[in-house]
Image (tube, grey):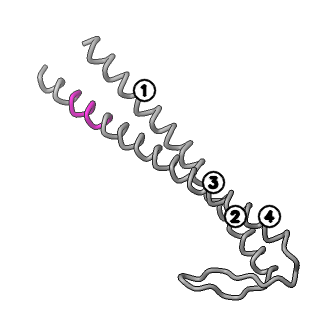
Amino acid sequence: MSGVDMELKKAFLELQEKKIGTEQTLRMSGIQIAAVKRAKQHAALTEKEIQALDDDTKTYESVGRMFILTPKSQVEENIRKKQTQADEKIKNLELEMGYLEKSLKSATDALRELIQQKKDS
């Protein structure tokens, strides 16, 4: 009887650790999504401001700690690339979160089953 209890206790602890780890990963993914969305919004605002400039206006892009004179069209193109990359990153993070949520639900259900099984025996 005590061997079964030890097995159940070990399985319970493993499932609980998996649940806690998944919850932490979900929180981190949420934080990453929020950061990427802020960066995307910043790029959109920057693009809007740059589009309002005349075509002959000198524009600079930062490279590390310095700024390089860059044509306005190139700056706009780079901003659009940043937005596209942000969209892809958000999509991937949301897919990962979906998988993690399913995994969390699965671990939670397994934990409930284990508790129910322990109560029944």
Mark closer to the observer (1, 4) = 4
Name the N-terminal-most of marks 3 and 4. 3
For the residues labelled 2 and 1, the Cα–Cα distance comes to 42 Å
Instruction: Inspect the magenta stretch and tell me whether residue 11 lies in it.
Output: yes
Q: Are marks 2 and 4 in contact (CB under 8 Å)?
A: no
| Residue 37 badge | 3
The amino acid sitting under disc 1 is Asp
- Counting the numbered discs, the total is 4
The amino acid sitting under disc 4 is Lys
Q: Residue at x 47, y 32 (%)?
A: 105
Q: Residues within 10 Å of mark 3 (few under 14, many from 20)?
A: some
Name the N-terminal-most of marks 2 and 4. 2
Name the N-terminal-most of marks 1 and 4. 4
Residue marked by disc 1? 109
What percent of the width, then of the height, locates residue 93?
57, 52
For the residues labelled 2 and 4, the Cα–Cα distance comes to 9 Å
For the residues labelled 1 and 4, the Cα–Cα distance comes to 48 Å
What percent of the width, then of the height, locates residue 16?
31, 34
For the residues labelled 3 and 1, the Cα–Cα distance comes to 32 Å
Name the N-terminal-most of marks 3 and 1. 3
For the residues labelled 3 and 4, the Cα–Cα distance comes to 16 Å
Name the N-terminal-most of marks 2 and 3. 3
What percent of the width, then of the height, locates residue 119?
27, 13
**Which residue lies most toward the left here?**
2
Q: Is residue 62 above or below residue 32?
A: below
Residue marked by disc 2? 43
Mark closer to the observer (3, 4) = 4
For the residues labelled 2 and 3, the Cα–Cα distance comes to 10 Å
Residue marked by disc 4? 48
Secondary structure beneath label 3: helix
Q: Residue at x 62, y 55 (%)?
A: 38
